[in-house]
Image (cartoon, rainbow, N blue to C red):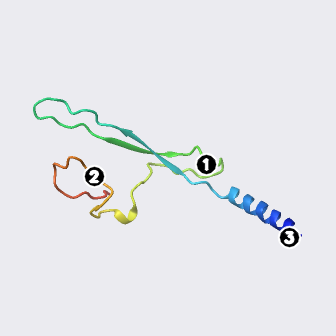
């Protein structure tokens, strides 16, 4: 009897977990800036990072968000970032902020 209850509990728990919505993942595509040209008054090229939704793991009935994904932590918006960012060599003193 106890074994039957245990098997039923595991089966119900598994069905419950499988019925939960799957998370929407976000992927990042990074385009490296390449070498700065060896000319007078060189201008470094931009580092480009693009974020996109990855819907490959979602269930067919799940709602898909639209627009561009937000990857900024809400609690860091408009605050000076003390960690998590590093520039090397740091030639331009200043502070780094999480943009809106």
Up/down of 55 relative to 20, above or below: above
Reading the image, the residue beneath label 3 is: 2
- The numbered mark, 1 or 3, whose residue comes first in the sequence reads 3
Disc tally is 3
Residue, far bottom: 2
Residue depicted at 65% across the width and 47% down the height: 60
Reading the image, the residue beneath label 1 is: 58
> Which of the image's four quarters has the N terminus?
bottom right
Quarter of the image for residue 50 reads top left
Which dot, 1 or 2, sits closer to the camera? Answer: 2
Question: In the rendering, at what x and y percent does residue 18 appear?
Answer: 70, 56
Separation of disc 3 and disc 2 at Cα? 57 Å
Is the Cβ of the residue at disc 3 closer than 8 Å to that at disc 2? no
Residue, far front: 3
Question: In the rendering, at what x and y percent does residue 4 appear?
Answer: 86, 65
Question: In the rendering, at what x and y percent does residue 22 appear?
Answer: 61, 54
Question: In the rendering, at what x and y percent does residue 48 appear?
Answer: 33, 41
Which dot, 3 or 2, sits closer to the camera? Answer: 3
Residue, far right: 1
- The numbered mark, 1 or 2, whose residue comes first in the sequence reads 1
Between 89 and 25, which is closer to the camera in this rendering? 89
């Amino acid at each position: 009897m106890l074994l039957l209850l245990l098997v039923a509990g595991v089966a119900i728990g598994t069905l419950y977990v499988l019925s939960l919505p799957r998370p929407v993942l976000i992927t990042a595509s990074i385009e490296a800036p390449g070498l700065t040209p060896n000319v007078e008054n060189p201008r470094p090229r931009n580092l480009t990072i693009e974020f996109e939704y990855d819907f490959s793991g979602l269930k067919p009935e799940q709602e898909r968000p639209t627009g561009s994904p937000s990857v900024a932590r809400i609690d860091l918006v408009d605050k000076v970032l003390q960690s998590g960012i590093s520039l090397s060599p740091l030639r331009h003193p200043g502070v780094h902020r999480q943009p809106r």
